[in-house]
Image (cartoon, coloured by chain):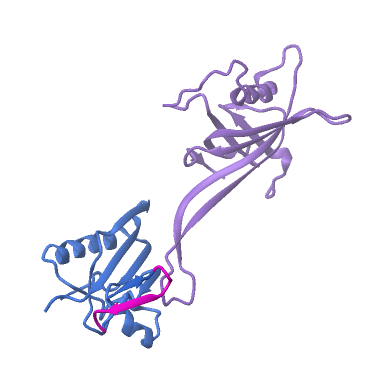
Amino acid sequence: MGYYSGGDGLMKVDNTAVATVTTWSFTASQETLDVTTLGDHDRKLVGGTRSVSGSASISWYSASGASAGQTQATALLNKLIKANGAAPSVVSGQDYNTSLTLGITDYDGDEKSITMGVILTSIAMTNSQGEVLSAEVSFEATDHPSAISL
Amino acid sequence: MAQFKPTNVTPSTRSYSPGEYPQVEFEAQNGVKTVIRYGKNRTGSSLSLGFDNILDSDAAAILKNYEDINSIWDEVTFSGTNVINGADSTLQSYLIERTELKWRYDGPPMVTSVFPGRSNVQCKFVACLDSP
């Protein structure tokens, strides 16, 4: 197989494969520094900071004997929403951080993915008639990806 | 008189004011204004240079230039540098101050680090009539 589709996709949250993910996407961006000077007729740029952000849609699942992979919507929800108002660690920020792996499984069964620490910036949940309850999760990478094999 | 360095660094922004003529204004209570002029040469012209996203080594060279020049209260010349790049020759003659005015640093350069290895630098110069 040369091309891949949604059926080949995979997503892991803190190394737990998410069984109920329906879409994921990420965008890697590169800022630029303008070094154009007086007298130039063409804009000149050099590379600045890089960043990665993205989103995913995860169906909410609840059943007797549900596996960890099936309940990641709840796990992610609890990372962002703190019912008791608990303050996360300001110094380490560990309570905010989530390890996210996005990728595909290739023709050989090998995983081709990108792994990064992220902060969840939003989770949107909508319950509507005739549709599966799902969580729309947005995230931004906290640093450079820790691994990439895509 | 010392040259501004590094000579090959071109500013991203440049602001120039030709200064004013030495004079004193008196305004009477009835609104009549009287001006006493003390000289025919303008003075106090100013030049602001902004160097955006330049290499840190160039920023350091500007700081070194400030130290070299201001430690002995020397004057600065922009002739032969890229400071006047992009300006028409008729304007360049003002920017380098062809009159009795001599450029000096009007305070230390301001360096703002914006990226590893890159900085923004702001320099201000003032040109006044020196006593003979």
Q: Is residue A67 above or below residue A139?
A: above
Looking at the picture, how far across and down is residue A138, in whole percent?
A: 64, 37
Residue at the top extreme, as displayed: A64
Looking at the picture, how far across and down is residue A46, in whole percent?
A: 44, 61
Q: Is residue B34 magenta?
A: yes
Locate residue B93 relative to residue A75 in the image: left or right.
left
The residue lying at 33 percent from left, 73 percent from top is B25
The residue lying at 13 percent from left, 76 percent from top is B131
Q: Is residue B36 above or below residue A1?
A: below
The residue lying at 26 percent from left, 82 percent from top is B41
Q: Could you say which is closer to the camera, residue B33 or residue B7?
A: B33
Q: Which residues are magenta?
A: B29-40
Looking at the picture, how far across and down is residue B68, in whole percent?
A: 15, 64
Q: Colour of chain A?
A: purple
Locate residue A56 relative to residue A118 in the image: left or right.
right
Does the rendering let one see residue A110? no
Looking at the picture, how far across and down is residue A120, in whole percent?
A: 59, 33
Q: Which quadrant would residue A121 be assigned to in this image? A: top right
Q: Could you say which is closer to the camera, residue A110 or residue A58?
A: A58
The residue lying at 42 percent from left, 77 percent from top is A39
Q: Colour of chain B?
A: blue
Locate residue B124 relative to residue A148 in the image: left or right.
left
For the N terminus of chain B, the quadrant is: bottom left
